[in-house]
């Protein structure tokens, strides 16, 4: 549930800087992962901002690619990672989508859409076992293969399985970008594209001096405020920034939360949940989740606006 009281500001210039840095550092094609509506930043707007810097895009489903009109951004292909049983090859080809395949049947059925082989190197999800690789390549007339690599060993296994076939290969997502041996013919960054590009904030609706038990849990704080954002928007207890100082979200209700404050903080002051030096990694550590989850939750908590690239 979005809150009208939460502002989500997306810096497309920062997104573009991130992509340019990745391309320069890696020296190979960049396939930008824009699944889940660009990690919450808006797939269409992100694609428009970086379209001239990337070789293509990557989503989970064909519907995502169509909804974001990705084919209209420079006529570059989009790799669809998930199952494609409900879409035919003609629809995919018209949308510029190349489906990932891992069975002979799907490779044959989707041949017109130029399928891409997903090789299982350990993920054991939506991927082709080693024994079937050559048959799937033949059935789909495949010229490209990839794997979901989380370790360099997965990259090496992809090379050993498909490297001799002459296929275009890619394996590295954000976590392996700094491994030269993982870059192969292309990289598929997701999180690395979006780090530092989202700023999420609200304002103090109420401020109290207390020192007595408060809230549902009876927390005690000398001074606290209330913000109009709660667990309905995905907010959790953890760090925030008020007037340049690190503070904490002390307790979270359904549509409001209590925030620790300093003596000078006042009603109407801004509370920042992401940005202003508060990184995705710091919030993820406090929330005990991934940086991807932090972005997906907070960028969908309020109303998005954009700073142009």
Image (spheres, helix red, strand yellow):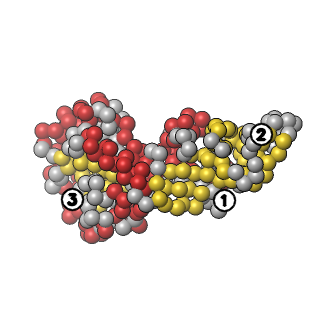
The answer to whether the residues at label 3 and label 2 have Cβ atoms under 8 Å apart is: no
Q: Residue at x 31, y 65 (%)?
A: 73
Q: Position of residue 220 (x, y in %)?
A: 81, 35
Q: The C terminus lies in which quarter of the figure?
A: bottom left
Q: Residue at x 34, y 48 (%)?
A: 19
Q: Which residue is mark 3?
A: 114
| C-alpha separation, residue under disc 3 versus residue under disc 2 | 62 Å
| C-alpha separation, residue under disc 1 versus residue under disc 3 | 45 Å
Q: Element type at marker 2?
A: loop
Q: Which residue is mark 2?
A: 263
| Vertical comparison of 184 with 229: above or below | above
Which sits in the foreground, 223 or 166? 223
Give the mark, 1 or 3, whose residue is nearer the N terminus. Answer: 1
Nearer to us of marks 1 and 3 is: 1
Q: Which residue is mark 1?
A: 5
Q: The N terminus lies in which quarter of the figure?
A: bottom right
Q: Position of residue 24 (x, y in %)?
A: 27, 43
Packing grade of label 2 (10 A; few <14, some 14-19, many >=20) is: few
Which sits in the foreground, 292 or 244? 244
| Vertical comparison of 69 with 258: above or below | below
Q: Position of residue 107 (x, y in %)?
A: 23, 55
């Amino acid at each position: 549930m979005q809150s009208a009281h939460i502002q989500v500001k997306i810096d497309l210039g920062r997104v573009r800087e991130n992509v340019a840095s990745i391309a320069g550092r890696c020296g190979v094609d960049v396939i930008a992962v824009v699944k889940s509506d660009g990690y919450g930043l808006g797939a269409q707007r992100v694609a428009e901002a970086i379209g001239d810097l990337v070789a293509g895009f990557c989503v989970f489903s064909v519907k995502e690619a169509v909804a974001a009109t990705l084919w209209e951004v420079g006529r570059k292909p989009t790799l669809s990672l998930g199952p494609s049983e409900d879409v035919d090859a003609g629809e995919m080809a018209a949308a510029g989508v190349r489906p990932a395949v891992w069975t002979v049947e799907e490779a044959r059925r989707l041949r017109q859409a130029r399928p891409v082989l997903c090789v299982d190197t350990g993920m054991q999800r939506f991927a082709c076992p080693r024994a079937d690789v050559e048959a799937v390549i033949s059935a789909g007339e495949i010229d490209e293969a990839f794997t979901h690599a989380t370790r360099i060993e997965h990259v090496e296994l992809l090379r050993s399985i498909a490297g001799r076939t002459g296929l275009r290969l890619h394996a590295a997502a954000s976590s392996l970008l700094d491994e030269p041996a993982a870059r192969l013919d292309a990289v598929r960054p997701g999180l690395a594209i979006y780090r530092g590009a989202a700023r999420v904030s609200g304002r103090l609706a109420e401020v109290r001096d207390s020192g007595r038990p408060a809230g549902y849990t009876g927390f005690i704080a000398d001074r606290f405020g209330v913000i109009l954002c709660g667990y309905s928007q995905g907010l959790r207890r953890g760090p925030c920034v008020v007037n340049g100082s690190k503070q904490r979200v002390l307790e979270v209700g359904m549509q409001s939360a209590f925030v620790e404050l300093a003596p000078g903080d006042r009603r109407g002051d801004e509370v920042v949940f992401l940005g202003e030096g508060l990184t995705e990694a710091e919030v993820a550590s406090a929330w005990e989740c991934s940086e991807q989850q932090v972005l997906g939750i907070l960028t969908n908590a309020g109303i998005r606006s954009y700073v142009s690239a």
